[in-house]
Image (cartoon, rainbow, N blue to C red):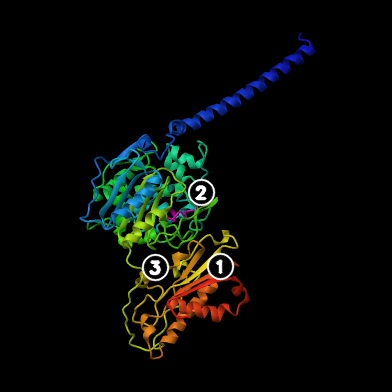
């Protein structure tokens, strides 16, 4: 018979043993679960351990694995013109700056003819580079190619038509392909850190890219916010692949690479036979990217063959509704602002370089200052690959090249006399200055500027020779001339001010010379637009100092604005810092 005290001790020992067994079992289950979770995406852990440290070094471009070829073979030399359109000293000056910024490759072409090709730091014409986010821009190009080739009907279709993972989701089912291309899909950016647990890093490391990208949490309603998100672009490429029924590398080859006659290039996969990383990591050389830029400069036509829908490049270069400097995976030169919205969650605005000296300029951007610049009006394409430089200045290199190609900033006007008196026909509709497209310059980031930072209001001169007494603001034919003088004249204020420049129903050139009573009412109608635009400008810029600039017709309106509006308003009078009135006697 067991003594009561001994029995109690045995019970305590058994309980203690069971407790330890329970703890051990929990630890074992947790360990097995962790090992199972790790094993379900074992490539993530292998990549994390073996990932090359310097992605901007060309020596590492082919070390990422697995990669599959788009095509093999040398990239043909670009076409070379008989004579340089850009003077050699201007090209050398651009190279001197690029070289000082640790550049590997710089290529310049005008109207498809090579002007300059130079390499440094051991690179040559065959050196492959990791394009980083330049692949994002190419994904937006591929959306246009998918539409042109009949795989997709419209960029406004819901992505869930092909992404069945989103079909039953009340938020994701409303995301359109255009939302994804404009970074307005609402998908979370994902914290990026050098960790396999950071969502932003996992997209680079995972062996299950579709699962990771399409499962990205939502941070906003579709179309409501600009959120820079790798997952948005990845989802877009997966939708294109599924719509076309072919893998990404094959689509790139069939729709872009082979028609361009481009050379060797590779895309990076999440696993053998898996998804290509379209948000990053297309491996290619400068010559191939120059051809892509030339395709874009030609509105999607290459050597007489159309590869993209007519007007698709214009669609890509339209500003996003939530970030006017961002198009479809590219950055726009206009409207200019001293800061550029890079992310909205978390919000990040970075200082912006001075404006490029061509309003229609835009560029594709990859991390580490990889660039493809395009100026369609000049036929100019510039490709730069190099080291990561936070002090890279877009304007310092580009504006010399642009200046060598631009015609004089003055606008030559013929005079067409309207065949009717002012007032016999309805006036053009008044522009709504709440809409950014009614401004040639409209800066972002105003709320972050110091109270002493000046705000500039520029009124352009007569640029319109049309057959009515006043220009119609939405008239696309009238815009290039306005943009040209705004770029050459308003830019003088960039160093001191954020500059606003309204498009307005300017009096036509015929009104300048009219002696039959049409001049004053035509100028009066134009002035009503100036007053409304200035009122919007004054409200938006708070109490900051005002710099007023007008030339020719714009000077007349500026002078009248001072006398009729500003002089009678104490608050506006106190804000006036300086007025420049040029082109008329004062």
Compute the Cα span from label 3 to label 2.
36 Å
Q: Identify the mark at residue 188; answer none if there is no mark.
A: 2
> Residue 347 location, x and y as percent?
54, 52
Dot 3: within a 10 Å radius of its alpha carbon, few (fewer than 14), some, or many (20 or more) residues?
many
| Element class at badge 1 | helix
Q: Is residue 101 above or below residue 335?
A: above
Chain part drawn in magenta: 179-188
Residue 529 is left or right of residue 574, and the answer is: left
| Element class at badge 3 | helix
User: Magenta stretch: residue 177 in it?
Assistant: no
Residue 308 is left or right of residue 564, and the answer is: left
Camera-side mark, 1 or 3:
3
Q: Which residue is mark 3?
A: 483
Q: Is residue 439 above or below residue 245?
A: below
The image quarter in which residue 211 lies:
top left
Nearer the N terminus, badge 2 or badge 1?
2
In the rendered picture of this protein, how many numbered marks are placed on residues?
A: 3
Camera-side mark, 3 or 2:
3
Q: Residue furthest bottom?
A: 516
> Residue 439 location, x and y as percent?
45, 69
Dot 2: within a 10 Å radius of its alpha carbon, few (fewer than 14), some, or many (20 or more) residues?
many
Q: Which residue is drawn at the image coordinates 61% and 72% (left, top)?
A: 574
Q: Is residue 45 above or below residue 8?
A: below
User: Magenta stretch: residue 187 in it?
Assistant: yes
Q: Identify the mark at residue 540; answer none if there is no mark.
A: 1
Camera-side mark, 2 or 1:
1
In front here: 543 or 99? 99
Q: Main secondary structure of the magenta part?
A: loop
Nearer the N terminus, badge 1 or badge 3?
3
């Amino acid at each position: 018979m067991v003594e009561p005290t001994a029995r109690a001790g045995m019970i305590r020992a058994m309980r203690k043993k069971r407790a330890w067994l329970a703890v051990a079992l929990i630890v074992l289950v947790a360990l097995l679960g962790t090992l199972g979770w790790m094993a379900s995406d074992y490539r993530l852990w292998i990549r994390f351990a073996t990932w090359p440290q310097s992605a901007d070094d060309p020596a590492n471009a082919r070390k990422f694995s697995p990669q599959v070829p788009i095509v093999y073979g040398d990239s043909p030399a670009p076409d070379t013109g008989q004579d340089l359109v850009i003077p050699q000293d201007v090209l050398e000056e651009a190279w001197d700056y690029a070289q000082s910024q640790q550049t590997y490759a710089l290529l310049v072409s005008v109207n498809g003819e090579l002007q300059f090709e130079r390499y440094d730091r051991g690179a040559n014409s065959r050196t492959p580079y990791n394009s980083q986010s330049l692949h994002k821009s190419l994904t937006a190009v591929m959306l246009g190619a998918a539409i042109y080739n009949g795989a997709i009907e419209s960029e406004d279709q819901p992505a869930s038509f092909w992404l069945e993972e989103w079909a039953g989701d009340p938020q994701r089912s409303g995301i359109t392909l255009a939302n994804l291309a404009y970074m307005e899909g609402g998908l979370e950016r994902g914290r990026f850190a050098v960790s396999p647990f950071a969502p932003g890093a996992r997209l680079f490391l995972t062996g299950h890219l579709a699962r990771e990208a399409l499962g990205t949490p939502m941070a906003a309603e579709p179309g409501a916010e600009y959120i820079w998100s790798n997952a948005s672009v990845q989802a877009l490429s997966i939708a294109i692949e599924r719509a076309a029924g072919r893998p990404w590398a094959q689509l790139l080859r069939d729709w872009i690479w082979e028609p361009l006659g481009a050379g060797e290039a590779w895309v990076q996969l999440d696993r053998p036979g898996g998804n290509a990383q379209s948000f990053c990591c297309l491996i290619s050389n400068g010559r191939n990217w120059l051809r892509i830029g030339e395709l874009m400069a030609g509105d999607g036509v290459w050597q007489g063959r159309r590869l993209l829908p007519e007007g698709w490049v214009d669609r890509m270069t339209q500003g996003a509704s939530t970030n006017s400097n961002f198009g479809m995976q590219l950055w726009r030169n206009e409207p200019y602002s001293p800061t550029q919205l890079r992310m909205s969650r978390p919000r990040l605005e970075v200082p912006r370089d001075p404006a490029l000296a061509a309003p229609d300029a835009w560029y594709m951007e990859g991390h580490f200052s990889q660039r493809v610049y395009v100026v369609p009006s000049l036929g100019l394409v510039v490709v730069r690959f190099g080291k990561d430089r936070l002090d890279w200045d877009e304007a310092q290199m580009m504006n010399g090249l642009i200046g060598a190609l631009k015609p004089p900033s003055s606008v030559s006007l013929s005079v067409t006399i309207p065949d009717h008196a002012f007032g016999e026909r309805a006036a053009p509709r008044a522009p709504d200055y709440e809409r950014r497209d009614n401004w040639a310059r409209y800066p972002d980031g105003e709320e972050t500027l110091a109270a002493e930072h000046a705000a500039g209001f520029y009124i352009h001169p007569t640029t319109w020779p049309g057959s009515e007494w006043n220009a119609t603001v939405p008239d696309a034919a009238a815009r290039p001339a306005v943009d040209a003088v705004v770029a050459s004249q308003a830019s003088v204020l960039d160093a001191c001010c954020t500059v606003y420049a309204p498009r307005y129903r300017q009096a036509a050139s015929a009104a300048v010379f009219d002696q039959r009573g049409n001049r004053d009412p035509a100028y009066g109608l134009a002035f009503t637009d100036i007053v409304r635009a200035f009122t919007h400008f004054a409200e938006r810029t708070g109490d900051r100092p005002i710099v007023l600039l007008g030339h020719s017709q714009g000077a007349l309106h500026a002078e009248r604005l001072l006398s009729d509006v500003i002089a009678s308003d104490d608050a506006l009078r106190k804000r006036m810092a300086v007025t420049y009135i040029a082109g008329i006697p004062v």
